[in-house]
Amino acid sequence: MKSKAARFSLRPQLLAAVVFIVVSMSRAAFAGDIVLQDAELRVAFDSSTGALVRLENRSSHWVIERRPELGISFRLFAPLPEQRYNFVLGQKQKAVRVEKISDSEIQIEWKNLVSEHGGVLPMIFTADVTLHDGKLTFDATLENNSSLTVETIDYPYFGDINPPSRNVSLNARTMWYGNLSSDELYPRFANEKGYWGDFYPTKTFESYRSLFCLIQAPQEGLYVEMRDPTQPYMLEYTFEQHPGAASSITNEVPQEDSIAGTPVHLEFRTCHFIFAHPHSTMKLAPIAVRCYSGDWHAGVDLYKEWRRTWFKEPHVPAWIEDVNSWTQLQINSPEQDYRVKYNELIRYGEECAKKGVKAIQLVGWNKGGQDGGDPVQDTDPGLGTHDELKQAIAQIQSLGVKIILFGKLTWADKTTEWYKNELYKYAATDPYGIPYEQGGYSYYTPTQLAGINNHRRAVMDFLDPRYRAIATKEFQKILDFGASGWLFDEVCHHGPVKYNFAEGHGYTPPGFIYNGDMKLGAQLREAADKVSPDFLFAGEGQQNWLMQYYSCSYFRINASSTPVDRYIDPHAPLVVAVTGFDDREMINMCLLDRYIIEYEPYNFKGFLSDFPLTLEYGKKVDALRKKYKEYLWDADFHDTMGATVTADGPVRYSVFVAPSGKRAVVIVNTGSEKEAVAKVELEHHGSLMTVTPEQLNAQPTTGTVNIPAESAAIVFEQ
């Protein structure tokens, strides 16, 4: 047996031979297939099976789908009454029609589908594939003439996703909670589903978090999009590494085309959770696929291009469009600490007015405290009366400080009599009739911190018009207090629930519960507009499309967060938590990415004066943003696009383009000990000036600036 070194020394010659053979075989197979191509893409389908057998970026010569023998058409899952595990595998189907009807369109039809355990199923699955200007679109329809429910269809299905070369990485990038996460696909692939639960290492990413998935190589990528922002059902972007990792320690993918006689390949498919009932016809959401050149910015640009065709810009109150900062204050918890009475709130309002903080996000004001009593939006007798809270809000707002009332409508506290007597009727249940449950959160006491007496919560069904009416009635109580807005906490998720299977909710189950989010948002916005169009709707880390109703987003970030929401919308009000007692790093991130600072001393249970170092630096940053508002607030955010920054230390930077076209570069020294010397390079720039949070008077610069540890500098065109 050859040593590992010997095997590696032979690899270049062997690889060249393998590539020659594979390319020759591919060309031979390619010649008999049905092909669509334009200046950007070439895609081929097997004329017999309808399988996708090749995909190539013609401009970069990236062969994404390489080996025709690994091509797959589709997969369908239709459980039998006594055996759920019943798939229709595309590899075992013949297409009745694969027809190129124009230079840009192919139609494919499969009929009488052969299932693994249920025989031939009277179903017709048709696909219409079009290619226009580099955009490959898959439209499909299922005609289910059987007595079975089709739960999922995987289409399109890529059987052999390849990186541009063996020595570059691939990552899946999807949006969630104000971030563009990055999950490695190659050269390492970690199993996310548990080795006991799958045959091959698997990763999935859901459409209710991100309408698109980027398959990102260092210099180019593949953009895949669920082309329906209404979220009619859940789609999963699914990756499956065959046959598995070479090492369970490193999760490294085998580098050869086969291992132990088995092909090595990465499958990628979009899995549509359609739950198509017997004797029904269902059109699938279109899937759009495009190649792009560059990093994630170029991929997200494709989403921004599509988003402009359907996103309805929300009305935003004028006060939040100016430079402003917030604080968050919790006054009660499910453990009934009753920390701040309603008539004591004025002290916090007076401090905010004195310190220049423009808004208080008030948490735990409602009956039961934070994460107790939901969805009730009544006052808590332990804190005072309804009129006392209303008066406190009016007093604070008369000082120029806005009150934003924190609320939750997603859950029902299962410890309450209201849930036991009524709300259980509107809760989501699983396929076995068992109500879903969200476990609640722990507060303060040893008993609850151990998870012993948490308030477990039912997940309410926003698709049910009866519950939407209840939620709207509770929301109107918030409106009655006269606050400037509300923040819908946890609006971004429904805990463990994707679908509700309970009967009697006003539709034929199952219902994709996220499909109700926009419906409820529209209903609540209509109620608010009757009181004031300037009533602010905020949410916690909501998905981008929900910002059509919840125009302001609050979330938490860390040093590795990617500012994708800011890149998509340069001017949306995005609020970020600042919790440290000398939190210059987080405030610098807010400056870097144009986030509104929300001060949260003692994890949002203290006074602003409790962390003077953080507040002092935050006020300097906001003073800088006010003085240079044209460059740092009213400007368009380009992230790192449009400038180059080199430094002798750890720095991050971002680029802003003012309405005048003049550019500003924010550079942050992320190091905690040493000064960094940074050089900014801008093409065709005018005279350059520099300012810092400590020095607001602009000074001329050549583009090279000295930045103290944990500080920042701005270089801008005069």
Image: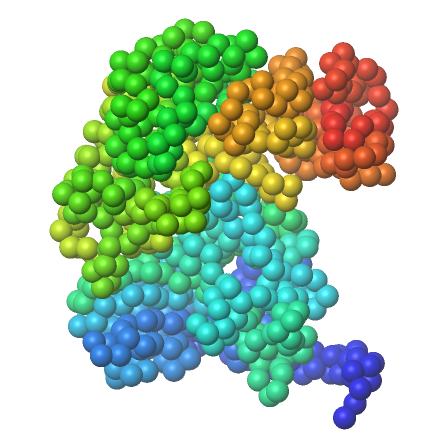
Along the horizontal axis of the image, is 686 left or right of 561? right
Q: Is residue 439 above or below residue 196?
A: above
Across and down, in percent, residue 338 comes to 37, 26
Residue at x-position 47% and y-position 18%: 359
Residue at x-position 57% and y-position 75%: 244
Q: Quadrant of the C terminus?
A: top right
Q: Quadrant of the N terminus?
A: bottom right
Across and down, in percent, residue 201 comes to 52, 71
Colour pattern of the rendering: rainbow
Q: Quadrant of residue 27?
A: bottom right
Q: Is residue 643 above or below residue 103?
A: above
Across and down, in percent, residue 559 comes to 64, 41
Residue at x-position 58% and y-position 66%: 190
Q: Quadrant of residue 108?
A: bottom left
Residue at x-position 59% and y-position 77%: 264
Q: Is residue 130 above or below residue 455?
A: below
Along the horizontal axis of the image, is 414 left or right of 466? right
Along the horizontal axis of the image, is 80 left or right of 358? left
- Residue 386: tell me if it is visible: yes
Q: Foreground residue, 557 or 98?
A: 557
Across and down, in percent, residue 176 comes to 49, 46
Q: Foreground residue, 499 or 377?
A: 377
Q: Is residue 282 above or below residue 240?
A: above
